[in-house]
Amino acid sequence: MEFMADEVIQTLDFLDIQGKVAVVGVSMGGYVAFQLIGKYPNRIDALGLVSTRATPDTPVARAKRMENIRFIREKGTAP
């Protein structure tokens, strides 16, 4: 998530967007949004969180997420 937050900032810099921005994190994007506000608070003006949570996945939820990732890598998204 930290890597993705860094990528967002690099994209803003590349686009020459230097002011503060409003960020909306949806689902896993909420985790990225939390990284952005924590690491780059001077770049964030507003934060919206949709269908996400403020706590990390439980070990069971993380295992399920990893299982889903493995499935998608092997079989694609069509199934």
Image (cartoon, rainbow, N blue to C red):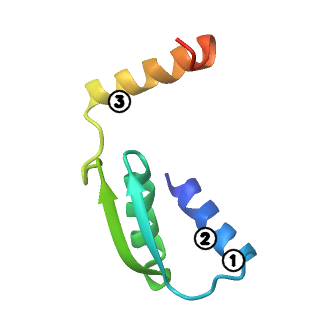
Q: Name the residue located 45 percent from the left edge and 24 percent from the top edge.
A: 66
The residue that disc 1 covers is 13
Q: Are marks 2 and 3 in contact (CB under 8 Å)?
A: no
First-in-chain label (2 vs 3): 2
**In the rendered image, which quarter is residue 76 located in?**
top right
Q: Looking at the picture, does residue 16 appear above or below residue 36?
A: below
Which residue reaches farthest front? 78
Q: Name the residue located 57 percent from the left edge and 55 percent from the top edge.
A: 4
Which residue reaches farthest bottom? 19
Residue 24 point in image, percent of width and height:
41, 63
The residue that disc 2 covers is 9
Which residue reaches farthest right? 14
- Disc 2 and disc 3: Cα gap in Å? 26 Å
Q: Residues within 10 Å of mark 1 (few under 14, many from 20)?
A: few
Element on which disc 3 rests: helix
**In the rendered image, which quarter is residue 6 located in?**
bottom right
Of the residues shown, which amino acid type is indicated by label 1? Asp
